[in-house]
Image (spheres, rainbow, N blue to C red):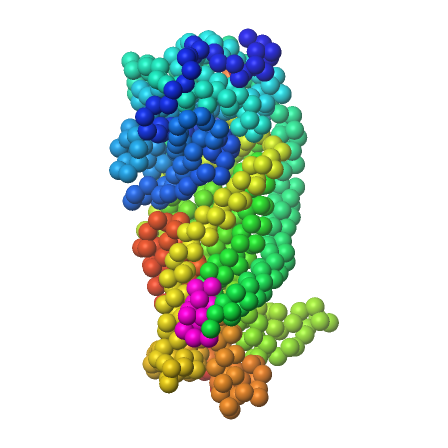
Amino acid sequence: MISNATPGLLRLCEVPAGEIAKIVQLLLPPPALEYVMQLGFVPDAQVEVVRKLPFRGPTVYRVQGTEIAIRHEVAERIQVRMRVSQVAGDQ
Amino acid sequence: MKLSSITASTSWHTLEPREALSSPNGKRTIALIGPPNSGKSTLFNRLTLLTQKVANYPGVTVEYRTGRLVGEIGFEIEVVDLPGIRGLASYSEDEEVASKALRGKIPGVAKPDAILVVLDSTHLERHLTLLPSVLAVALPTLVLLNMSDELQKREGSIDLVRLAGTIGAPVALVSAKNGAGLDAVRVFCQQPVFPASQDNFPILQNVSACHKWAQQIRKESDYKAPVPSAWTKRLDEILLHVVWGPVVFGVVVLTVFQSVFSIGQPLSNHFQVLLDAVGKDVFQRLPDGWLQSLLLNGIWRGFSSILVFVPQILLLFLFIAVLEDSGYLARAALTADRVMQRIGLNGKSFVPLLSAYACAIPAIMATRTIEDRRDRLATILITPFMTCSARLPIYTLTIAAFVPNTKYLGGLFGLQATAMLCLYVLGFLAAMLTAFLLKSSILKSSGMPFSMELPEYRMPSLRSLAVRLIDRCRVFVMNAGAVILIVAIVLWVLTYFPLSSGEPPAIQDSVIGHLGRSIEPFIHPLGFNWKIGIGLFTSIFAREVIVGTFGTIYGVDPETRSLNLQEALRRDLSPAGAAALVVFFAFALQCTSTLAVVRRETNSWKWPVLQFLYMGMLAFTSAWLTNLVVSQLSRF
């Protein structure tokens, strides 16, 4: 489950439903990057994978207390780190 | 601060009591701004009731609404509702327009004197990220934390005094849904002099900085986020379930489709009968002559051709409003997304496309839920390909005349029904192909990824539903009506002249009749004669008109007078010509109301003209090929 040869890093699309991950960096071109960041997918933000739709459809994430769905192709380009101890942080 | 202080949210936290209000000179303009899903529109409707006007910003498709603040004393306060945005950078047309509007840089739109920012109090941290860029505009600003009822119900809380202190602007907790706390808006707007705004607000350079700031503010103001709604979690387990999700989706979609078809369509038909009766009753009191004819056959007919869509629009928008306000529409879009992605669109295009099977007009208006401009435009452009109910009269007539009523499998499948189904599929395929072409050429994705915020499920409020429905209908009748009226008058002139001994001519001798005859050489390869030609002209108005035109033409022709319409058609059309005729109608944009609505929704003549030409050429070529192929086949 390790991608891009960087140890400890996962792609957001690889995080299973129900788990929480922390965003490390976003590998997106500028306009899309700003847009996704506006949605709350910023470095250091905690993202909970709420629900995956079938056939590589969009996935629902909880960011800053809101459920937001983005497509698989975007989640592929977001690098995250999963916490060893699943603490919900300071929410 | 605990719950008790939230219920007292109408109290004014940071503004000192002022002396008796005196009316400042002239009127004030207040801009209303907020992120999508902040309840901004509901708030705007609540503040301005039905005083709203809709306009487009010059040169762009972004629409804005203005309305008068109701219940104020003394002077006029105009509220301008800006598009829902997450930031003030220029990543989208909406953001650019909102940013310019706040700074008074849009010609013809007054610079606001103050700003109302609407944020959802149940998603405060994420919504706070909009605030830095708004405060940096340095206008007097009131921050409204909306959905106080929800926050309270789900046990969230916030210290308003500390929040106001840290951001340096007055704050009020309100509920647009039940009206709680809205006095604060009136008090703020009516102050004789606005308190000086904090003009040294730090300009945060990027999105990350805004998020850090929001996090900081959240901590400092003791914000306790509401517990996630248990209902939402439970419902989503079913509605987004791998199996049940699509099942429920299918049921909802079929219900909407079936209702618009089997309730809306008859309603519209009855309404048409009523409108015709009213028109005749009123205008036949006038003396016979051109004036009566112009009023009745020109203006009233044009006007009622628009009014007749109102029941269907009302019904479809009632469904969409209920689905949207309850929160299901977001889930439906998500469910449909994977399929729509194949043709380059996204899940939000699904509902408009489906409603287009009933009528393209409400469907085109329903594309407003699509945020991406290019996706919205592509959806608008393919919508008229879906088989709308106005195509049914000519389809039914032609199929009944030319396709034998053979049944298969013990009457379960009929040849006529199969022919009808083929026409539906034909329209659908043309729509998909066109979408694909558009999305891979002139309407390539803007690079903004698809996203969908899933709001908590809520009970839609009747009041907000009613205001939205009335508003939609008003906008539709006012805007599309003007265009239709002009077209109706032009068509009337074409059928009323030239006068023969002071009397209007029979339709085949009128200008439009001559036009129909003059194009006979062009439509001959399609298998059509001049009578069909006249029908093609009159049906530019609306597709169903062609059947009435045939009725008139064959009715005045002594040779066909005794025949019914089906027999008359069989005399004039070969089977190949008949196939070409229905194919022509499957593709051609024979509907001035659609053109008017596309013009209105895209704020330009470019798109409706392009759409008309494209669909017309496709219709002509396909009808020609159909005639060619079918007539070759029938030789064997």
Relative to residue B622, is residue B180 drawn left or right? right
Reply above or below: B64 against B359.
Answer: above
Relative to residue A91, is residue B267 drawn left or right? right
Q: Position of residue B590 (x, y in %)?
A: 43, 66
Reply above or below: B576 against B244.
Answer: below
Viewer-nearest residue: B50 or B26? B26
Viewer-nearest residue: B565 or B505? B505
Q: Report the predominant secondary structure element of the magenta stretch.
A: helix
Is residue B48 visible in this depiction of the protein?
Answer: yes
How many numbered marks does the figure carry?
A: 0
| Image quadrant in which the N terminus of chain B is located | top right
Q: Position of residue B492 (x, y in %)?
A: 40, 70
Q: Residue at horizontal 49%, vertical 28%?
A: B71
Reply above or below: B556 against B287.
Answer: below
Question: Does B297 lie within the magenta span?
Answer: yes
Q: Residue at horizontal 43%, vertical 64%?
A: B299
Viewer-nearest residue: B32 or A49? B32
Relative to residue B35, is residue B274 drawn left or right? right
Toward the bottom, the furthest residue is: B559
Residue B97 sits in quarter: top left
Is residue B261 visible in this depiction of the protein?
Answer: no
Relative to residue B510, is residue B301 drawn left or right? right
Toward the right, the furthest residue is: B410
Q: Position of residue B537 (x, y in %)?
A: 40, 73
Q: Position of residue B550 (x, y in %)?
A: 50, 78
Question: Does B397 lie within the magenta span?
Answer: no
Residue B491 sits in quarter: bottom left
* Highlighted magenta segment, given as a residue range: B288-300
Q: Residue at horizontal 31%, vertical 55%?
A: B606
Q: Residue at horizontal 40%, vertical 54%?
A: B598
